[in-house]
Amino acid sequence: MKTKVLKVFMLCAVMITALHVSLSAQEDDVLKKMAGEWTYTMPDMGGGGAMDGKCIIATVNGETKATLSTPMGDITSSALKLENGKYVGNMDIPDFDLGIALYFKEDVLMQEILSGFGDIVVEMKRAK
């Protein structure tokens, strides 16, 4: 009896480890696909007109981060973490809570700017 329980336990441990390795590899593949320079056009949000922007996604020291170029300068996210099918990070802006969520919709990379004023969703194109 103990031998059977031990065998079942070992089999479960091996299966969980294999699943974890497989999911980690899939996450790495998505992050590698996201890596690089992307361009986008932010819609008019009431006054300034549409704004063209650039997003660079890169992995440094094992952490993948997104850097947005804005008229106020570059803003870099915290390390992107997978949450509900999207890679989410916080933007470091004093006195303002802002986040970014990145995900693929078919073959188009989508960027969501997450703020207290409502979320903005834009399509990004790989820079040439």
Image: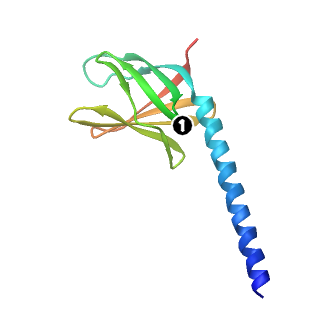
Amino acid type of disc 1? Tyr
Which one is nearer the viewer's eye here, 118 or 19? 19
The image quadrant of residue 10 is bottom right
For the residue pair 45 and 3, the one nearer the viewer reads as 3
Q: Residue 20, how many percent across, how many down?
A: 65, 54
Q: In the picture, residue 29 is in which quadrant?
A: top right
Task: Give the number of callouts.
Answer: 1
* Point 27% across, 40% down: residue: 116
User: Where is residue 53 drawn, in percent x and y?
Assistant: 41, 17
> Is residue 39 shown above or below 97?
above
Q: Nearer the viewer, residue 65 or 47?
A: 65
Q: Which residue is mark 1?
A: 103
* Image-quadrant location for residue 90: top left
Name the image quarter holding the N terminus.
Answer: bottom right
Name the secondary structure under disc 1: strand
Give the x, y percent position of residue 56.
48, 22
Of 25 and 14, nearer the camera is: 14
| Residue at the spot 62% in from the left edge and 31% down from the top edge | 32
Q: Is residue 108 above or below residue 13?
A: above
Query: Dot 1, how many residues are within 10 Å of its Cα: few (below 14), some (14-19), or many (20+)?
Result: many
Visual colour scheme = rainbow
The residue positioned 51% from the left and 26% from the top of the image is 57
In this rendering, is residue 108 above or below 82? above
Q: Is residue 102 left or right of residue 50?
A: right
Residue 75 sits above or below residue 15 on the image:
above
